[in-house]
Amino acid sequence: MGKIYPFGYNDAAVNIMKTRTAQDNAKLFLNYAKPNMHILDVGCGPGSITIGLAQALPDCHIIGIDKEGSQLDIASEAALQHKVVNCSFEQASIFELPYENDSFDAVYGHTILMHFKEVEAALAEIRRVLKPGGYISFREVDFGSNIFYPSDSALAEVMGLFRRSFFHNDANPDLGRSLAHLLEQNGFSVKEFNISMSQATTLTQKEGMYQSMVALWQQAEFPAQAVELGWITQNQRDAIPAQLITEASQSHTLNSTCYVEVVATLT
């Protein structure tokens, strides 16, 4: 097996992405957004954040881009269902944005930079299309700062393998901790940052989260890669779903994912 996208575009991954909202995942950026902005959402996936931004900013127009066409079909259909007319979706790469220089007042991205080895090249392309003084905002994970109790829980094992797979596939699942510094090194002036932990806070939410992780474990490529590379055995892989289901009903288990959101301006 060669290099993979650990999260993937499987149904489980898409369903997880669909739960993201602008109110929760772009909270800091919304504090800086202004009327009549032209906004680019890079790596929009199924469009839930893009649509949320459009709903929260009715005087703005938001373009969501993704390299995966299937995601854009889902996003466009969702915009129609929600009757949101001030956003649109286009297939494009963050490394080759099909826009003129100085085209956007703001650029937003959620858990997108973590996937790239050539982050500086992506930021250079964003600088090109962003107007002078324009805003850039990213929210990235820092899996190395996640919390699990007990520390040897099944979910901790899954997320540990998930993190290891990202590193193996030339990505950085701990990017959040260096996000502000990265932006400063690439021509942006940091205005504000926020570190937050995301977790299920009720047993019902926790059971739903565990069900999502079972589905992701069964559908994503990273578990198969883990077996192939000798990180776990096939028997261990097969046992994980039942372990997760058991753990979901245990009130004492805890997990929380670390996110870092940064807002900066083009200097």
Image (cartoon, grey):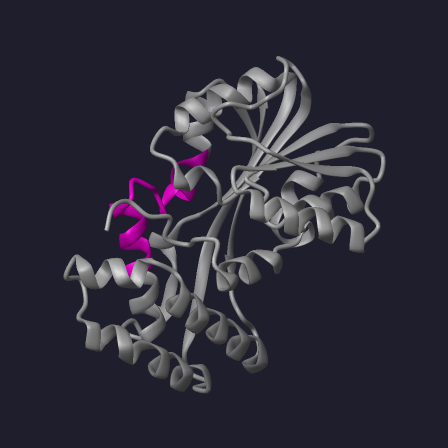
Q: Quadrant of residue 60?
A: top right
Report the side of 252 relative to 262 (left or right): left
Q: Which residues are magenta?
A: 160-179
Determine the main secondary structure of the stretch shown in magenta: helix
Question: Residue 41: percent from the left, percent from the top?
Answer: 62, 36
Q: Quadrant of residue 172?
A: top left
Question: Residue 72: percent from the left, percent from the top?
Answer: 62, 44
Residue 141 seen in the figure: yes
Report the side of 168 relative to 171 (left or right): left
Of residues 89 and 106, the one drawn nearer to the viewer in this rendering:
89
Queried whether the magenta region covers residue 92, the answer comes back as no
Residue found 36% across the figure and 71% down from its top: 155
In the image, residue 210 sits, relative to residue 160, either above or below, namely below
Residue found 72% across the figure and 35% down from its top: 62
Residue 267 seen in the figure: no
Of residues 32 and 233, the one drawn nearer to the viewer in this rendering:
233
Queried whether the magenta region covers residue 163, the answer comes back as yes
Question: Residue 59: percent from the left, percent from the top?
Answer: 85, 34
Q: Quadrant of residue 244?
A: bottom left
Report the side of 75 relative to 123 (left or right): right
In the image, residue 118 sits, relative to residue 101, either above or below, namely below
Residue found 43% across the figure and 86% down from its top: 250
Number of numbered discs on residues: 0
Q: Quadrant of the C terminus?
A: top right
In the image, residue 222 sits, relative to residue 150, either above or below, namely above
Of residues 84 and 262, the one drawn nearer to the viewer in this rendering:
84
